[in-house]
Amino acid sequence: HEEVSTMLSGRPVWLAARLRGLEARDVLAAHRQAVRLNHRLLLVIVPASDDEAMRISRAADASQMRICRWDAGDVPDENTQVLLTDGPEDLGLWYRVSPLAFVGGSLLTGIGGESPYEAASLGTAILYGPNVGKHLASYTRLVDAGAARIVRDADSLAAAVLQLAAPDQAAQMAHAGWDVISSGAELVDRVIADMSDYLDTKDSA
């Protein structure tokens, strides 16, 4: 984590996590818009799978932005605009160095999105698309707390990234997400403790 953070030299970073190939065009278009106003902004893309990585790589090449292929041994420099990884194996690292993340599988129909709690638990502000039916309650809870924001297309994604690239903005959302995660953990711990007490009482009776 320290090595990667040093390598990025304090650049503003946002993450597209568990991205699908069919979402890549919108995400790359959003980044292209954003770097016009924040030229040091770096996008890290973590594909959902190896198959998706191939599709995303082709879309990145077509974008004509300056690409760094992390798993091929490339090292990002000041001119790098997009850092591509091959899959989600090191996703935890990228969440930790990216204060803002778009959670993939949410701009497409038929997938149902990905759980946002992975990002929230690692201190990342969350952006997501409208198609999160499998995790709607989780996203609603985070939105209500101010920890997540919905986007619908490349334009709204670019606008959100530019606004939340400011460290204080993303930090507020990330803190709200952590509050949601930690309050849920406390509730689970309390239920487990109550059940243990009940079982102990029943056994002694």
Image (cartoon, helix red, strand yellow):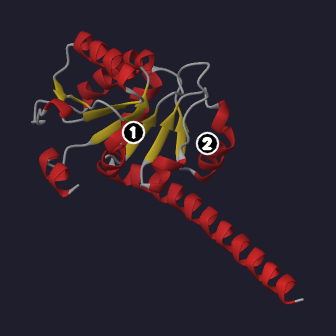
Foreground of the two, 179 or 49: 49
Disc 1 versus disc 2: distance between alpha carbons?
A: 20 Å
The disc label shown at residue 91, or none:
none
Q: Which is more foreground, mark 1 or mark 2?
A: 2
Instruction: Locate residue 165, reporting x and y percent.
Output: 33, 42
Q: Residue at x 37, y 54 (%)?
A: 168
- Earlier sequence position, callout 1 versus callout 2: 2
As drawn, the residue found furthest toward the bottom would be 204
Q: In which quarter of the image is the C terminus?
A: bottom right
Query: Label 2 belongs to which residue?
Result: 139
Instruction: Locate residue 158, reporting x and y percent.
Output: 39, 27
Q: What residue type is labelled 2?
A: Tyr
Query: Label 1 belongs to which residue?
Result: 163
| Above-or-below relation of 18 to 183 | above
Tell me if 135 is positioned left or right of 45 in this view: right
Q: Which amino acid does label 1 sit on?
A: Gln
Figure disc tally: 2
Q: Residue at x 44, y 15 (%)?
A: 22
Foreground of the two, 30 or 62: 62
Count neighbours of disc 1 (C-alpha within 10 A) and say few if under 14, some if 14 to 19, many if 20 or more. Answer: few
| Above-or-below relation of 56 to 135 | above
Tell me if 105 is positioned left or right of 137 in this view: left
Q: Residue at x 52, y 33 (%)?
A: 128
| Above-or-below relation of 145 to 89 | below
Tell me if 65 is positioned left or right of 108 in this view: left
Instruction: Locate residue 61, reporting x and y percent.
Output: 22, 13
Q: Residue 44 sits in which quadrant?
A: top left
